[in-house]
Image: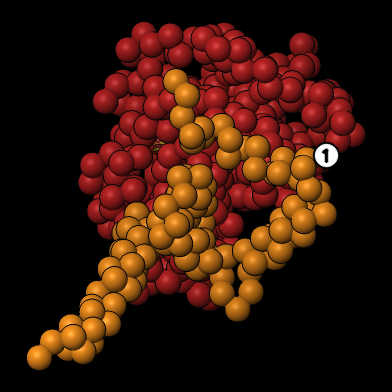
Amino acid sequence: MKTYYDPEDLKKFGKIGEFQKPLADKFFDYYGEVFAEGALTAREKSLIALAVSHTVQCPYCIDAYTVDTLEKGCTEAEMMEAVHVAAAIRGGASLVHGVQMMNKVKELSM
Amino acid sequence: MKSLHALHHQLSDTETQIEILEEGVGQKLGLPFFQRKMRDAGLFPLKPTTLEILQLNLGKMCNQVCKHCHVDAGPDRKEIMTRETMEQCLRALAESDIPTVDLTGGAPEMNPNFRWFVEQCHALGRHVMVRCNLTIIVANPKYHDLPEFYRDHGVEVVSSLPFYNADKTDRQRGTGVFKDSVRALKMLNAVGYGMEGTGLVLNLVYNPAGAFMPASQETLKRQFKRVLRDEFEIEFNDLYAITNIPISRYLDYLISSGNFEGYMEKLVNSFNPIAAEGVMCRNTISVGWDGYLFDCDFNQMLELPVATPAHQHIRDFNAKALAEREIVLNQHCYGCTAGSGSSCGGTTA
Ligand code: SF4
Ligand code: SF4
């Protein structure tokens, strides 16, 4: 079956360098450094990445960071709470624009 | 739940396991041979370093039937090391200077000669470690005094606790195991195990409850310490993070859950030459319940004996021949060399 997303493609991510190596190298170096232990732990960063994966709704990222959070020793409750954080921010971001709508209504209404 | 052996499962046959590890199931695996990887890393043939640990499987009988068990242990397994074989082990110990005796199973405590054997090893001045599954301590009143027995013989206790919550632990080890493990850990703490200043060592073993790799040992240790102390008032010394080796019941889990190919690929891609240098078969000899000798517990379960044809049984123990042997390697060994490495004492890199 032909689909836009193939789980096997995730393994080929590194190959984006075949078409443009210097930028790919820069990206992967940066990526590696971002996820290293720092002011935030690698474990905290992995949970953030899991939440963001759900925000950008990238199936590759969701797969990758589900595995990564498990491999960082996260619990399933922690993982689901991270997804709720993403959902809350997304929902809140829609709702807070309700104020803009209200402003416009008031501007246009008698 | 029954053992694969009792179910006459195809994976209770070790040749079938090895074939699957080499060839795959259905579709061809096409992964590089472990020996070749080791050759590239300058580690083939793999030779032992110094023999420091004699690890003994006192029997396959166990009060638990964990899903990932590489021994395929359980209450339905009747293989138990006899007193005669234990005496042969003691002779080998007395004739050598191996400092540590590591007792495993099954639940080693279920062997009727367990306590006698520990006393003998202690009398020989050897450091004794026991791989205690915790729940055995509370399984039957006759085991309730094990913590005191361990303490009196200076035994180091090494215990599996795959996670600090009931959900993940019970999914892997059986319903109620977490609760019983907590009870047993408190009993061990009560006699001084894991407590500062007592010198009584209680180490925990983490292994992933699924088809993924372990987290960093240090991170896990910090988390386990915090949660076990805050929520359960439990103390322990060290935590070993180990990788599940794709054999026996864990192999069955991998295949039936559709994770086998992906897991093997992951192990191969995470091959770490530094971890490979420190694999445990270099300083350990594993003795089967029937006295046969193996490079490690995993080779024992795959029935791959040491490559010293004239000295394959503990009654013919020959330290020199064993020191000169070549370690028997196969595809399952990728489990020991992935990432930070894995052994009975945790990471190796
Ligand atoms: S993993 Fe340990 S406790 Fe569990 S069945 Fe196997 S020997 Fe018994
Ligand atoms: S499985 Fe055994 S023989 Fe293979 S590397 Fe690990 S310890 Fe050594």
Confirm or reject: label 1 Cβ below 8 Å from ligand 2: no
Check the image and report above or below for A12 versus B169.
Answer: above
- Comparing A79 with B218, the one in front is A79
Check the image and report above or below for B134 versus B114.
Answer: below
Q: Residue at x 60, y 78 (%)?
A: A39
Chain in orange in the render: A
| Residue found farthest to the right | B42
Give residue B141's position: percent from left, percent from top: 23, 46
Which residue, given by chain and number where applicable, does mark 1 sit on? B49
Give residue B253's position: percent from left, percent from top: 41, 27
- Comparing A62 with B218, the one in front is A62
- Comparing B277 with B293, the one in front is B277
Chain holding disc 1: B
Amino acid bearing label 1: Thr
Identify the colour of chain B in the image.
Answer: red
Q: Can residue A77 be seen at all in this image of the molecule?
A: yes
Q: Residue at x 54, y 44 (%)?
A: B213
Q: Secondary structure at mark 1?
A: loop
